[in-house]
Image (spheres, grey):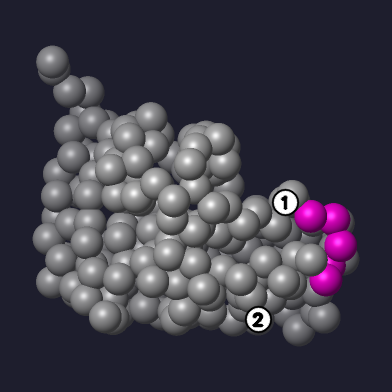
Amino acid sequence: MIQTPRELRNSKLAAKLITNLQMRHYDAYYCPTGADVINKVKEIIPEGSSISWGGSYSIRDIGLTQFLKNGNYNVYDRDDVTTQEDKIRIYRKAFECDFYLASVNAISEDGVIINIDGNGNRVAAITWGPEHVILVVGLNKVCQDVDAAIKRARSTAAPWNMARFDFNTPCQIDGTCHDCKSPNSICNYISIQRMSHPAKRHIIILVGEDLGY
């Protein structure tokens, strides 16, 4: 099958990224489509595993969370509860899970991962706790270097995410980053992840589709 220019570029970029991620002790794969991601996750996660996830739209949009909830897994989903107390309980339960799923806000071409959080529960779980972390990353989040990745997280991902919430922050009003100190800021915790530790605790699934924010 003849690849389109986009498909050809994505496959080459993914191959370069996988090499760089492996040098940083990650397990890494490339899936051209969201459907391929679901099949890959099915290979990786044994039935009966305990699983939780952050607020990623990337994993929701491809149907991955629904697939896991319909399968033979022990799932802890904050969307299934209504009170803030129960949500916090699930945030904490995530640290005990076999697998934690999330995406990233940006990743540099040499494999450094940037994440931004309002509450910090996602970056905390990615950093420490769950036995395995699977990060599903659309290639639209790849940036040339770390500085560009941080700028993407602050100036693109954060305003888009704030548009989901009815909070009165400067970026929610005009769509641009003001480096604000609003009490409702979503940019309270910024994580720069250089490597996976212990080795291969983090599993990166690169996707040849534009996913998430």
Q: If you read the primary sequence from the N terminus, does the residue marked by circle 2 or circle 1 appear first? A: 1
Q: CA distance from mark 2 to mark 1?
A: 22 Å
Decide whether residue 180 is among the magenta residues: no
Residue lying at the far top in this picture: please name it: 1
Q: Which residue is mark 2?
A: 188
Q: Secondary structure at mark 1?
A: helix
Q: Are marks 2 and 1 in contact (CB under 8 Å)?
A: no
Q: Does the image show residue 112?
A: yes
Q: Classify mark 2: helix, strand or loop.
A: loop
Tell me the residue that label 1 is attached to.
79
Instruction: Tell me where residue 45 appears, x and y as whole percent.
Output: 35, 51
Residue drawn at point x = 48 percent, y = 41 percent: 72
For the residues carrying marks 2 and 1, which lies nearer the camera in this image? 1
Whole-percent x, y for residue 88 in the image: 74, 72
Q: Which residues are magenta?
A: 81-85
Does 61 sit left or right of 130 as displayed? right
Q: Nearer the viewer, residue 191 or 73?
A: 73
Q: Residue at x 54, y 53 (%)?
A: 74
